[in-house]
Amino acid sequence: MQSAVSETNGKVICRQEIHRLVRMTQVLMLAAEVASDLRKNNSYPTAAEVREKIVQQTSRPDDANNDCVELVLEFVKPRIKERKKGLYSELVCRTLLLGDRVRRGPDWSFHEQDSGLAGTVVGQDSDSEAVWVEWDNGHLNMYIYNERFDIYSIKKVQEPRVLTDELVAVGCKVTRGKDWTYADADGGPGSVGTVLRVTQNGSVLVRWGSSNTDVYKMGMNGLFEIQIWQV
């Protein structure tokens, strides 16, 4: 046993610790479920609101312990930090929207940051009014899009995101998948959304035409709440 552990860089777990690992897994699953539910209705929950939600979800007050509450807040917090930067927030521009596809504009001065590819608008900085763009090469940065002074580092294009080996990518158009359970949160049957962010665990941030933005599973835990839109 010890040789196998050494070869795989693993660890031997004592029988007495198994119940602790099982409990830890249960807490993680509960925290992820509660955080997912809160993101639909309350993007900025307090610890007290999280605790109340845990009790409602499980009917077991013991589950609303500090560890679980902190985990839920950690799951929700990244969205809060990103929004403070202006990421994944609606734009104040008249001629550009969150999720629009763009390319270099007439005032481009950023060399090969875009690798000559198209990109997707994923937010707008609240202080400088610069627009966040994630290029199809994965590079993320801010660019000037000033409608008052006609300074445009980027321009809007009608150019779909083309997948290579990926299941989904930023800029893809999506619709409801076979595991959709969010009523008309997308704006109703047939609604199309734009992918703004993709994580390694299979969760995807989508902005719908109704301006509603939320996280959905696409491969996470074997669930496909959204799917690529077929024109």
Image: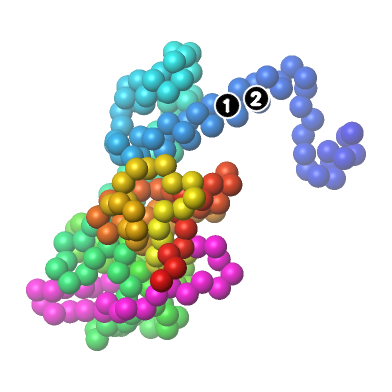
What's drawn in magenta, residue-wise?
A: 142-168
- The extreme bottom residue here reads 106
Could you give the CA–CA distance between mark 2 and mark 1, rounded to whole angstroms?
6 Å
Q: Position of residue 206 (x, y in %)?
A: 37, 55
Give the residue at x 47% y 58%.
227
Instruction: Single out the residue that lies furthest toward the left.
Output: 148
In the picture, measured across the screen, residue 146 lies left or right of residue 66, that is left
* Nearer the observer, 113 or 203: 203
The quarter holding residue 105 reads bottom left
Residue 182 lies in the magenta-colored region: no
Q: Is residue 132 above or below residue 18?
A: below
Residue count near mark 1 (Cα–Cα under 10 Å), binned few <14, some 14–19, many ≥20 = few
Give how far across and how far down residue 33 sits, in percent: 46, 33
Q: Residue 204 shows which numbered tag?
A: none
Secondary structure category for the residue under label 1: helix
Q: Quadrant of residue 121?
A: bottom left
Quarter that holds the N terminus: top right
Q: Main secondary structure of the magenta part?
A: loop
Residue in the image at 27% along x and 63% along y? 98
Across and down, in percent, residue 101 comes to: 33, 73
